[in-house]
Amino acid sequence: MYLVGFDDAYMGTIRQFNTEMSLYDYEKIIESLMEDMSKEDAVEYFEFNVVGAWMGPGTPAFFYGKEESA
């Protein structure tokens, strides 16, 4: 499963047990969304509409760097 419009943020595929999923760079997606909205709005939109959406097995995963995960 892939996210439309975020090709630049795509990092590859990861596997957890017997499920594979696409991995995306969280910050790159936020930067992309900030072309049309503020950072606060971009984070709120992305968290609610994408990170918070369960799309079944294979739902994409998001990479947070050390600074973001602290």
Image (spheres, rainbow, N blue to C red):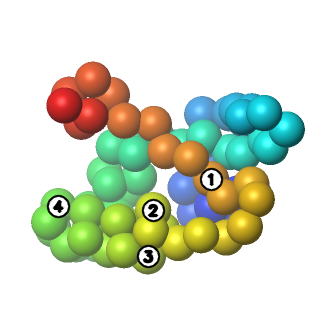
- The image shows residue 32, relative to residue 49, as above or below, that is above
Q: Position of residue 53 (x, y in %)?
A: 53, 72
Q: Earlier in the sequence, mark 1 or mark 2?
A: 2
Q: Earlier in the sequence, mark 4 or mark 2?
A: 4
Real-space Cα separation, disc 4 to disc 3, in angstroms: 15 Å
Name which quarter of the figure residue 8 lies in.
top right
Q: Are marks 1 and 2 in contact (CB under 8 Å)?
A: no
Q: Report whether 12 appears left or right of 70.
A: right
Which residue is under mark 2? 51
* Extreme residue in the right direction: 18
Q: Report whether 39 appears left or right of 1.
A: left
The residue located at (85%, 38%) in the rendering is 18
Which residue is under mark 1? 60
Question: Residue 39, which numbered label?
Answer: 4
Real-space Cα separation, disc 4 to disc 2, in angstroms: 16 Å
Q: Amino acid at mark 1?
A: Pro
Name which quarter of the figure residue 40 lies in.
bottom left
Element type where label 4 sits in the image? helix
Q: Amino acid at mark 3?
A: Asn
Question: Residue 49, which numbered label?
Answer: 3
The residue located at (78%, 33%) in the rendering is 17
Real-space Cα separation, disc 4 to disc 1, in angstroms: 22 Å
Q: Position of residue 32 (x, y in %)?
A: 37, 56
Q: Residues within 10 Å of mark 2 (few under 14, many from 20)?
A: some
Question: Residue 20, which numbered label?
Answer: none
Q: Quadrant of the N terminus?
A: bottom right
Q: Are marks 3 and 2 in contact (CB under 8 Å)?
A: no
The residue located at (32%, 54%) in the rendering is 30
Tell me, yes or no, if residue 8 can be seen here: no
Q: Amino acid at mark 4?
A: Lys
Real-space Cα separation, disc 1 to disc 2, in angstroms: 8 Å
